[in-house]
Image (cartoon, grey):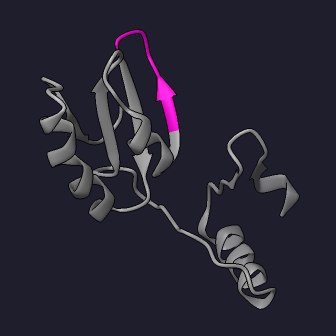
Amino acid sequence: MLDYYNKDQYRFEFKSIGPRNNALKILEQNGFDYDLVEDFAGHILKLPKFSMYAPILKNSIATKETATERLFLMKDLAAVHFFMPTIKSWGNSSPHAGSCR
Protein backbone atom coordinates (compact mmCIF):
# COMPACT_ATOMS: atom_id res chain seq x y z
CA MET A 1 0.00 0.00 0.00
CA LEU A 2 2.99 2.27 0.38
CA ASP A 3 3.05 2.84 -3.39
CA TYR A 4 -0.38 4.50 -3.15
CA TYR A 5 0.22 6.67 -0.10
CA ASN A 6 0.59 10.43 -0.60
CA LYS A 7 2.57 11.45 2.48
CA ASP A 8 2.17 15.17 1.73
CA GLN A 9 -1.64 14.90 1.77
CA TYR A 10 -1.87 12.10 4.40
CA ARG A 11 -4.04 9.93 2.18
CA PHE A 12 -4.07 7.01 -0.20
CA GLU A 13 -4.69 7.73 -3.88
CA PHE A 14 -5.67 5.06 -6.39
CA LYS A 15 -6.06 5.26 -10.16
CA SER A 16 -7.93 1.96 -10.48
CA ILE A 17 -10.54 0.05 -8.51
CA GLY A 18 -8.61 -3.20 -7.97
CA PRO A 19 -5.80 -1.80 -5.83
CA ARG A 20 -8.28 0.45 -4.02
CA ASN A 21 -10.48 -2.49 -3.06
CA ASN A 22 -7.45 -4.48 -1.84
CA ALA A 23 -6.33 -1.55 0.30
CA LEU A 24 -9.81 -1.12 1.79
CA LYS A 25 -9.85 -4.80 2.78
CA ILE A 26 -6.47 -4.46 4.47
CA LEU A 27 -7.60 -1.34 6.34
CA GLU A 28 -10.82 -3.00 7.51
CA GLN A 29 -9.04 -6.18 8.59
CA ASN A 30 -6.71 -4.10 10.74
CA GLY A 31 -9.47 -2.07 12.37
CA PHE A 32 -8.99 1.19 10.47
CA ASP A 33 -11.85 3.46 9.46
CA TYR A 34 -11.70 5.39 6.19
CA ASP A 35 -13.53 8.03 4.20
CA LEU A 36 -13.82 7.07 0.56
CA VAL A 37 -14.09 9.98 -1.88
CA GLU A 38 -14.55 8.83 -5.45
CA ASP A 39 -15.92 12.02 -6.98
CA PHE A 40 -14.99 15.44 -5.67
CA ALA A 41 -17.86 17.17 -7.48
CA GLY A 42 -20.04 18.94 -4.96
CA HIS A 43 -17.55 18.44 -2.13
CA ILE A 44 -15.55 21.59 -2.87
CA LEU A 45 -16.13 24.94 -1.14
CA LYS A 46 -14.56 27.91 -2.89
CA LEU A 47 -14.01 31.20 -1.07
CA PRO A 48 -12.39 34.46 -2.12
CA LYS A 49 -8.74 34.45 -1.05
CA PHE A 50 -9.09 36.97 1.78
CA SER A 51 -12.28 35.55 3.32
CA MET A 52 -12.60 34.16 6.83
CA TYR A 53 -12.02 30.42 6.63
CA ALA A 54 -10.71 28.95 9.93
CA PRO A 55 -13.79 26.82 10.83
CA ILE A 56 -13.95 25.47 7.29
CA LEU A 57 -10.24 24.64 7.30
CA LYS A 58 -10.69 22.66 10.54
CA ASN A 59 -13.45 20.59 8.92
CA SER A 60 -11.89 20.06 5.51
CA ILE A 61 -9.99 17.05 4.23
CA ALA A 62 -7.68 19.03 1.95
CA THR A 63 -7.14 22.61 0.83
CA LYS A 64 -5.63 24.40 -2.12
CA GLU A 65 -4.91 28.08 -2.56
CA THR A 66 -4.85 29.91 -5.88
CA ALA A 67 -4.07 33.53 -6.65
CA THR A 68 -7.70 34.57 -6.10
CA GLU A 69 -9.42 31.89 -4.01
CA ARG A 70 -9.15 29.13 -1.42
CA LEU A 71 -10.56 25.69 -2.23
CA PHE A 72 -11.62 23.29 0.52
CA LEU A 73 -12.39 19.61 -0.04
CA MET A 74 -15.08 18.69 2.46
CA LYS A 75 -15.73 15.20 3.84
CA ASP A 76 -19.27 14.98 2.51
CA LEU A 77 -22.14 17.02 1.09
CA ALA A 78 -23.57 17.53 4.59
CA ALA A 79 -20.43 19.47 5.54
CA VAL A 80 -20.76 21.63 2.43
CA HIS A 81 -24.40 22.42 3.19
CA PHE A 82 -23.62 23.03 6.87
CA PHE A 83 -21.11 25.78 6.09
CA MET A 84 -22.95 27.58 3.27
CA PRO A 85 -25.21 29.64 5.61
CA THR A 86 -22.22 30.47 7.82
CA ILE A 87 -20.19 31.66 4.85
CA LYS A 88 -23.03 33.88 3.67
CA SER A 89 -23.50 35.34 7.17
CA TRP A 90 -19.82 36.35 7.20
CA GLY A 91 -20.58 38.55 4.23
CA ASN A 92 -18.47 36.62 1.75
CA SER A 93 -19.90 37.78 -1.51
CA SER A 94 -19.10 34.76 -3.59
CA PRO A 95 -19.03 31.46 -1.71
CA HIS A 96 -19.44 28.58 -4.07
CA ALA A 97 -20.00 24.87 -3.67
CA GLY A 98 -19.24 22.68 -6.62
CA SER A 99 -16.56 20.92 -8.55
CA CYS A 100 -13.00 22.03 -9.03
CA ARG A 101 -11.44 22.21 -12.50
Question: What residue appears at the point 35 percent right and 17 percent down from the top-left corner?
Answer: 49
Kindly indicate the quadrant of the structure image that contains residue 47: top left
Question: Residue at horizontal 77%, vertical 55%?
Answer: 4
| Residue found farthest to the right | 2
Instruction: Read off the magenta span.
Output: 63-68
Q: Quadrant of the N terminus?
A: bottom right
- Position of 37 relative to 49 (above/below): below
Rendered position, 4 above or below 101: below
Residue 25: image x %, image y %? 72, 84
Determine whether 82 is above or below 97 in the image. Answer: below
Q: Can you say which quadrant of the picture contains the C terminus?
A: top left
Q: Nearer the viewer, residue 27 or 93?
A: 93
**Residue 59 locus on image (x, y percent):** 45, 52
Q: Residue at x 14, y 27 (%)?
A: 91
Count the labels in the image.
0
Residue 65: say if magenta.
yes
Q: Is residue 45 left or right of residue 6?
A: left
- Determine whether, in the image, residue 33 is placed left or right of residue 87: right
Q: Position of residue 77 (x, y in %)?
A: 29, 61
Q: Nearer the viewer, residue 25 or 64?
A: 64
Which residue is at a point 28% across and 53% down the rendered structure image? 80
